[in-house]
Image (tube, rainbow, N blue to C red):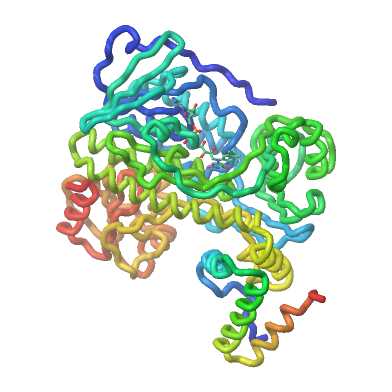
Amino acid sequence: MPYDYQPFPYTTPPGLTSPEPRHKAVIAGAGPIGLAMALELANYGVPSVVLDDNNVVSVGSRAICWSKRSLEILDRLGVGEKSVAKGVTWKVGRTYHRDAEVFNFDLQPEEGHKMPAFVNLQQYYVEEYLVEAAQANGLIDLRFKNKVTNIRQNEDCATIEIETPDGTYHLEADYLIACDGAKSPIREMIGLDFKGELFEERFLIADIEMQAEFPSERRFWFEPVFHPGQSALLHKQPDNIYRIDLQLGWDANPEEEKKPENVIPRIEKVVGHSKFKLDWVSVYTFQCRRLDSFVQGRVIFAGDSAHIVSPFGARGGNGGLQDVDALGWRLAAVLDGRSPPAILGDYDSERGHGADENILNSARATKFMTPADGIERLFRDQVLALAAKAPFARAWVNSGRLSVPCVYPGAGPDDPALPKVSRPGSVAPDAPLGNGWLIDRLGGEVMVLAFGCGVSDIGGATVIKPELTDLIRDRYLGDATAAVYLIRPDQVVAARWPYVDPAAITKAIARLWRQ
Amino acid sequence: MALIDTTNLADHDGFYAELLATHQGLSEMQSQALNAQLILILANHIGNRQVLSEALKLARQNIG
Ligand SMILES: Cc1cc2nc3c(=O)[nH]c(=O)nc-3n(C[C@H](O)[C@H](O)[C@H](O)COP(=O)(O)OP(=O)(O)OC[C@H]3O[C@@H](n4cnc5c(N)ncnc54)[C@H](O)[C@@H]3O)c2cc1C
């Protein structure tokens, strides 16, 4: 069944009749990132107004692959389990050269995590679930058909000009969070550079509906017989929808290529028959770009407005949700007066690091797929040839390195004797705990995890003492007999010690909040 | 077999990118020259005749 696009209701905003009191947070854009931002702030008790120029979810599927980390974040926002239930769970990717498999990966080789490595779920479903959750949340004022047309700011606040079907009005906000997408009008209004590169290549991206028994694995081909000389991707989504990406070459004419009479024969060659329906087709050229700084006074950028990547590696939407993760608790702390605005600089540097890593990985994959003539193509083709002869070359075959959260640099004290998976700067690894999961116990506030030792009350943190199972030992203790972990509100490990030192914990907590 | 034919290089994607970056701006002949020098440099560094013979054999397989 094709997705049924239901328009969301528009109601006349109060600001049209009389000035509204200053808001704490106004969010521009109700895409996945803006909606997640509103829900995250609400989790910290911060009310927000969300403005969107449109009144439907993402037209066309766009993002389909949601990472384990995104699912953990969505879970905190109340829509994680629903997304997993509806989505197609997968963890294995296979890459082929012509007919032969040359590389495969398993993204979650070990058990003991609440969330799977990845689910595929159309972006319109994720947005639909987030809109439902936002509408049910008393702290969120969601305003469709409210288009941001101009902004101004001074030291104190941002002023936002808004156009509605009933006329124009303005709002004042302590902070404006610009989640207005890759073309970000707000970025333009401020006149910020969006630096990076464009890949001179065109990709046909199509969603088709068909009954098929294809595995839920991600399958990618270099130079397949059904699409000579180019690359192709096939991936399953819910509702019998399949995503197909076909590389077309830079000379392809996007308008011509989008026509069903041209798309259908190409897809017939991929799937081997004509028993499918076209659901959505688009032709893309991909870019990797980012803002120098995501914090511009009273305006904060998150998601595609701050950074864009080519989709091989699924690092766009997933990267944006990690922005929300790193920003929510800090912005709430600034608005509550707990932390100075300087703490927003930590958001900027951490997510700048994340964006660089995502750009690096997606740019490398895109280059491997679209090598320039000459030496780049020579090496690419010879990696593929060598992969058939020697196992080591397979690791170089690059059809996308899938999104994993980066490890934030500059985190607090560490002890290298403890396991690498849980080093400071990483997301606290999940493990089964009692009848539930460790990850469900973490987040929302600062926590101290005491493994194999006791920690008495620490000001500004909740202490928990998880039971020592084998998986918990593997992920948090290694060969140590005891350890103390400090966990941030976004479930990231802030610091750890193989002994109890209350003064060091207190100091690390103050550092987190920049107090 | 003395030649390691399984993954043995950390940050292999980073190496690949650096390799291509090293070739940037070179003509085809210059790139060939760079590749030739690189092979000789690495051969000397490896310093094991048997490994090098096996590597040559592997590279030659299915070519020409
Ligand atoms: C083909 C394709 C495949 C992809 N696959 C994946 C994937 O598998 N996994 C993944 O994680 N990511 C993927 N992505 C990337 C993902 O779609 C984006 O990263 C994601 O949509 C970013 O969300 P966002 O909320 O920042 O921006 P958007 O989704 O673009 O939302 C921006 C919102 O702002 C609104 N807006 C714009 N201007 C204004 C204004 N002036 N006033 C008010 N509102 C405004 C827009 O209407 C829109 O609702 C893919 C992208 C493409 C194109």
The quadrant where residue A390 appears:
bottom right
Q: Position of residue A106 (x, y in %)?
A: 60, 57
Residue A478 appears in the rendering:
yes
The quadrant where residue A45 appears:
top left
Q: For this rendering, which residue is in front, A401 or A86?
A: A401
- Seen at 45% across and 18% down, the residue is A144
Q: Is residue A512 left or right of residue A176?
A: left
Q: Position of residue A286 (x, y in %)?
A: 58, 44
Q: Residue most toward the right?
A: A273
Q: For this rendering, which residue is in front, A184 or A222?
A: A184
> In the rendered view, would you say A105 is above or below A478?
above
> In the rendered view, would you say B22 is above or below A369?
below
Q: Position of residue A456 (x, y in %)?
A: 18, 53
Q: Is residue A432 left or right of residue B7?
A: left
Quadrant into which the N terminus of chain A falls: top right
Q: For this rendering, which residue is in front, A160 or A332?
A: A160
Residue A241 appears in the rendering:
no
Q: For this rendering, which residue is in front, B61 or A308?
A: A308
> In the rendered view, would you say A138 is above or below A446?
above
